[in-house]
Image: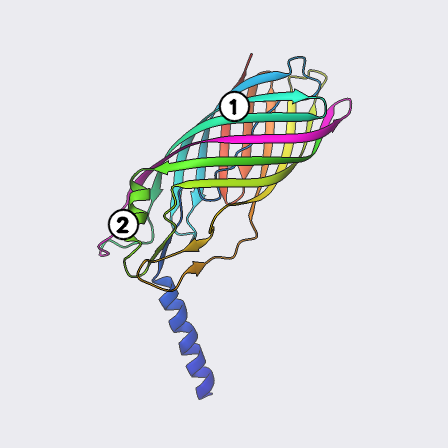
Amino acid sequence: MKLKFNLLLLAAGMIISSCSDHIYAPAMHHSDIAYLPKPVSADAVKSANYISGALVVDESPNYSDELVSAQLNFSRGHVFDHFNLAYSAFGTLGNYHNSELQPQDPNYFKNKFFGAAGGRLSGNFFVSGSHIDFRFIGFEAAYSHEFGDYLNFRRAVTNQPGFYTDPRADLFTLGGTTEIIFHTNKVANQFGFRLFWGGTFGNDNVYRNKNSDYNYRVYSPGIVTAAYFMQIKNFIGIVEAGNYVQLRLGYRLK
């Protein structure tokens, strides 16, 4: 009984100790991928521009803090025989909301501003039917560069006791996709569902303290997201979810 009691105390101590550590990831960590629309094979116009605005809600690695941002996307999509391609530029402005650090902590803050800019690239091989394109294999890539107060904060506390951070400002994510997209007799009405699975290059999910030999290594099977795309005439709507939720509305330009 005494041995069991001591083991319980040891386990409780380890949990309390781990709860006292603070982990901070890049603002766009595992939320930098976003669906890029492209014309379907039945479209009369084989290239199109798209502009959209998004609301993105994400959580910190310890699920205690919240990141909320607005994003502006501009992309161009092309469809060829059995292959399509899209590329985009985007900008993000957001807020990191602290719920973990308490007011008595010398590093306490309520909100930290962050921003990011970058580009995305997407391509798919597909086969088509009368009202469907099956984009059976594809890829998506995203590059983002972060700036702002939250990045400065991560870099400032990385040598302080109990703080473990990923101080990177630049992220590059790559992964594979599969998608199915339908259209009605009016080709401008389109509905698609896409799955993405990939990862971020570098020492991802590793958080360090400059004055500690210990590194947090968070196990992750990769980045998995699901997206639903809808186009009615030239208006588009996208819902995407994974480690984050993104709601996007936009317009297909002629």
Give the residue number, with chain letter if any, for mark 2.
156
Q: The residue under label 2 is which amino acid type?
A: Ala
Front in this rendered view, residue 201 or 97: 201
**19, above or below 203, in the image:** below
Percent position (x, y) of residue 124?
A: 65, 31
Which quadrant: the C terminus? top right
| Residue drawn 29% across the image and 56% down it | 159
Determine the CA span between mark 1 and mark 2.
Answer: 35 Å
Q: What is the quadrant of residue 86 in the picture?
A: top right
Q: Decide if residue 204 is on the left or right side of residue 138.
A: left
In the drawing, what numbered circle is on residue 75?
A: 1
The secondary element bearing badge 2 is classed as helix
Task: State the extent of the magenta-drawn residues as a range.
Answer: 104-133
Which amino acid does the dot numbered 1 rest on? Ser
Query: Does 101 lie within the magenta span?
Result: no
Q: Earlier in the sequence, mark 1 or mark 2?
A: 1
Residue 39 seen in the figure? no
x then y, percent, for residue 111 = 29, 42
Residue at the extreme right of the image, as rendered: 130
Q: Nearer the viewer, residue 153 or 210?
A: 210
Q: Position of residue 238 (x, y in %)?
A: 55, 30
Residue 151 in view, yes or no: yes
Picture layout, residue 218 above or below residue 43: below
Percent coordinates x, y for residue 39 in the rendering: 63, 21
What type of secondary structure mainly makes up the magenta span?
A: strand
